[in-house]
Image (cartoon, grey):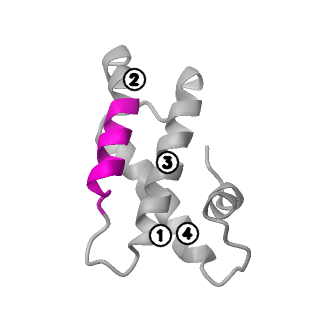
């Protein structure tokens, strides 16, 4: 499970001004994966779930001034490719 510290390290954020925002992005990424029926708590899926979470957090943080929080096309494709086997294995 990705922590605030993990997300900040991934984003290369050293200040604490955006901590609440980054935590919301972590929560939103996990919620997004849950809505896609990804088994976010499956022990054998944690590396993929964590990678997808960080990709989404990066995307959300980079476009934080946009009107919505949906992944960019490139990240959406990458996340979909990573989670497809998980969704199949756990369906």
Mark 4 vs mark 1, foreground winner is 1
CA distance separating discs 3 and 2: 14 Å
All told, the count of numbered labels is: 4
Would residue 5 appear left or right of 7 to someone viewing this image? right
Q: Secondary structure at mark 4?
A: helix
Q: Which residue is mark 2?
A: 86
Q: Are marks 4 and 1 in contact (CB under 8 Å)?
A: yes
> Looking at the image, which residue sits at the far bottom?
17
CA distance separating discs 4 and 1: 7 Å
Q: Which residue is mark 1?
A: 61
Q: Earlier in the sequence, mark 4 or mark 1?
A: 4
In terms of image quadrants, where is residue 10?
bottom right
Q: Which residue is mark 4?
A: 22
Q: Which residue is mark 3?
A: 53
Mark 1 vs mark 2, foreground winner is 1
- Residue 84, percent across and down? 32, 26
């Amino acid at each position: 499970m990705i922590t605030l510290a993990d997300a900040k390290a991934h984003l290369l954020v050293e200040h604490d001004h955006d901590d609440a925002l980054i935590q919301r992005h972590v929560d939103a990424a996990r919620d997004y994966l849950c809505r896609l029926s990804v088994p976010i708590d499956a022990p054998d899926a944690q590396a993929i779930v964590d990678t997808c979470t960080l990709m989404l957090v990066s995307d959300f943080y980079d476009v934080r001034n946009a009107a919505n929080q949906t992944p960019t096309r490139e990240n959406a494709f990458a996340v979909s490719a990573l989670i497809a086997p998980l969704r199949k294995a756990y369906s």
